[in-house]
Amino acid sequence: MSIHREEAILFARSHIEEYISSLKKLVEIPSISTLPENQGDVQRAATELAYQMETLGLQNVQVMPTQRHPVVYGEDLSAGPDKPVVLIYGHYDVQPVDPLELWETPPFEPQVKGDFLVGRGTSDMKGQIAATLAAYHALRSTHGMPVNVKFIVEGEEEIGSPHLRNFVENHRQLLASDISLNPDAGMLAPHLPTIVYALRGLAFFELLVYGPSHDLHSGVFGGVIHNPAQVLCEVIAGLHDKNGTVTLPGFYDRVRPLPDWEKKELARLPLESEVLLEQTGVPALWGEAEFNFAERIGARPTLEVNGLYSGFTGQGSKTIIPSYAMAKISCRLVPDQNPHEVHEQLLHHLKNVMPSTVRWELKYLGGGNPCMTDIRHPANQALAAALETAWGTPPIYKREGGSVPVVGDFKEILGIETVLTGFGLPDDRIHSPNEHLHLPTWKKGIEALIHFFFNLAEQEGLKH
């Protein structure tokens, strides 16, 4: 290890409590992007993040408005024009905390419990932003950044990044870079550093089924009025067959078959049934039997019901035929599926199966394209070497089941590839009560990022 690397890593270790304290300040702000009542908190989180970025030494820090929640930008171009520019992506918004009663500690009062920092956003993804800023600070405070960096941290990822694409299109020159780093992907286990080379896309919908003009007495009208809740349940039940395969006509037409090398690579992933059962708490697993677990999670598209609502849901009884029923539905997509084509497929299917006894409406709430990065790309090689140095073992490569639409947008608009990693773990309970961050893994991640930036400076073929 070079003396410069060693000094940066020792600096990061000696300032780790400061980095945890800064992370706590971010987590304390309930930046829930989907709830109108938290709009001020989202703005407050952006302001706090900008303050931290300036304090750590970034220049040209700006809180930049969009049509809803702002983007925070900062840069350090002191490495010079002969060094690559890395565009670092993150998001500071978080998911709602419901059900609140299941939290063991208040979600926005972060607490260290053993090896974990508990609180909403600790893992997804304020903790990942904090790790990247910590690595930057350690490098800048010792011998300076070996590469140029630009940070773009948005406040709408948890609602599908509806305005980020336009932001990127309108700020091409500001964001011009050679490669992007996205630390929002995570690891499979504390001892398994991970590089994600593919992301699933997303298409999100709201399906509304309307029956009577108002709730009806089920005794007076039951038997002559088609209940919209029943219609919705029957339609949803028909979206999969008994094997778990999606029944939308044409849904799989664009799905790429897996080559042999990728099947072998995915087979290396430690996704055993016992592990998945322990992580999820379900009594048994489900899905397309002809594909292994890693293929189902990362290489196969899915259709999921994310929420259902109809009629009376309070305690006790209220015997009604509800006036409407609603379902939230999302599809995770793989190369080369397109969210707008899936929208048309779902529309076509609903037109064929909806009975004439109800009215219905399908709202397209947003989506993003799937994407893949070559694992042989110089930036992926720099990241692989960095992870191996920090963990003492080569990383594993996986397809991510989740979606990060900005990766495809960066490739299409800015012409750059993205390397994906992160230091969250599968059992961090992101999007659920008692979200937490494994601090030993997070600390190793900071050191891996320091190595990554040094490795990038030594790579050839990165400059545009």
Image (cartoon, rainbow, N blue to C red):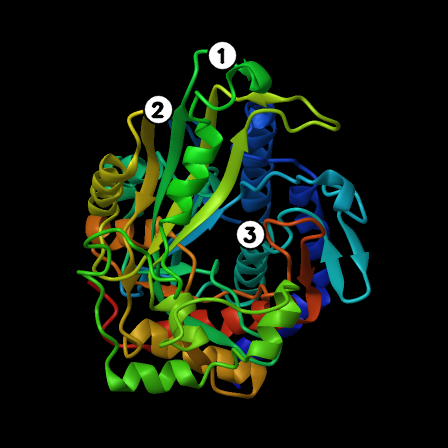
Q: Residues within 10 Å of mark 3 (few under 14, many from 20)?
A: many
* Mark 1–mark 2 distance (CA, rounded to whole Å): 13 Å
Is 280 situated left or right of 266 in this image? right
Q: Residues within 10 Å of mark 1 (few under 14, many from 20)?
A: few
Q: Amino acid at mark 3?
A: Met
Residue under circle 2? 358
Q: Position of residue 446 (x, y in %)?
A: 58, 67
Q: Identify the residue at horizontal 22%, vertical 39% (top origin).
A: 352
Of callouts 1 and 3, the N-terminal one: 3
* Mark 1–mark 3 distance (CA, rounded to whole Å): 43 Å
Is 326 situated left or right of 412 in this image? right
* Mark 3–mark 2 distance (CA, rounded to whole Å): 42 Å
Is 149 situated left or right of 340 in this image? right
Residue under circle 3? 125
Q: Position of residue 146 (x, y in %)?
A: 42, 67
Q: Amino acid at mark 1?
A: His
Displayed quadrant of residue 14:
bottom right
Residue 8 makes an appearance in the image: no
Q: Identify the residue at horizontal 55%, vertical 52% (top origin).
A: 125
Residue 344, placed above or below residue 385:
above
- Secondary structure state at the residue bearing disc 1: loop
Residue 233, placed above or below residue 251:
above
| The disc label shown at residue 438, or none | none
The residue nearer to you, when weighing 416 against 282, is 282
Question: Of the residues tagged 1 and 3, which is closer to the observer?
Answer: 1
The residue nearer to you, when weighing 436 against 415, is 436
